[in-house]
Amino acid sequence: MGAELERNKLTLEDQNGTDGNNATIVNTSGVLAITGIKVGTATIAANGSAVTVTHGLGTTPTIVLFAPSQNLGNLTYATLGATTFVINSSATTGTATIVLWLAMKLG
């Protein structure tokens, strides 16, 4: 996959071949470069308050975003590393909760 948006001078290159889950977006004007993006889901167990995510980015993310499928109070992340990060919640529920996440590396 490859695409160019000349007006904003953005280039999108699929670094993984077919899945588009490891894209590099480069702003050729030098304003912003996202050198890696990974997305996925993680499950916080019933009555649990944390989950370790293996992000597969290959480097420590600059930005991590997430959205739970139900209210878990305040969500924070910790222990950012080249292979994992931890999502912590301030509340628990009686059922497992899926959390959508996105990890990005700015270059």
Image: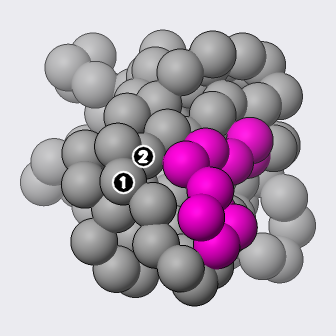
Is residue 29 visible in this depiction of the protein? yes
Identified at 46% across, 72% down, the residue is 93
Q: Secondary structure at mark 1?
A: loop
Q: Which residue has dot 1 on it? A: 91
Residue 107 as seen in the image, left or right of residue 86: left
Tags 1 and 2 in contact by the CB under 8 Å rule? yes
Q: Amino acid at mark 2?
A: Ser
Residue 18: x and y in percent read 83, 77
Q: Is residue 26 above or below residue 105?
A: below
Q: Amino acid at mark 1?
A: Ala
Q: Which residues are magenta?
A: 44-53
Identified at 35% across, 43% down, the residue is 90
- Mark-to-mark CA distance, 1 and 2: 5 Å
Q: Residues within 10 Å of mark 2 (few under 14, many from 20)?
A: some
Residue 83 as seen in the image, left or right of residue 1: right
Q: Is residue 2 above or below residue 106?
A: below
Q: Which residue has dot 2 on it? A: 89
Residue 29 lies in the magenta stretch? no
Identified at 61% across, 45% down, the residue is 50
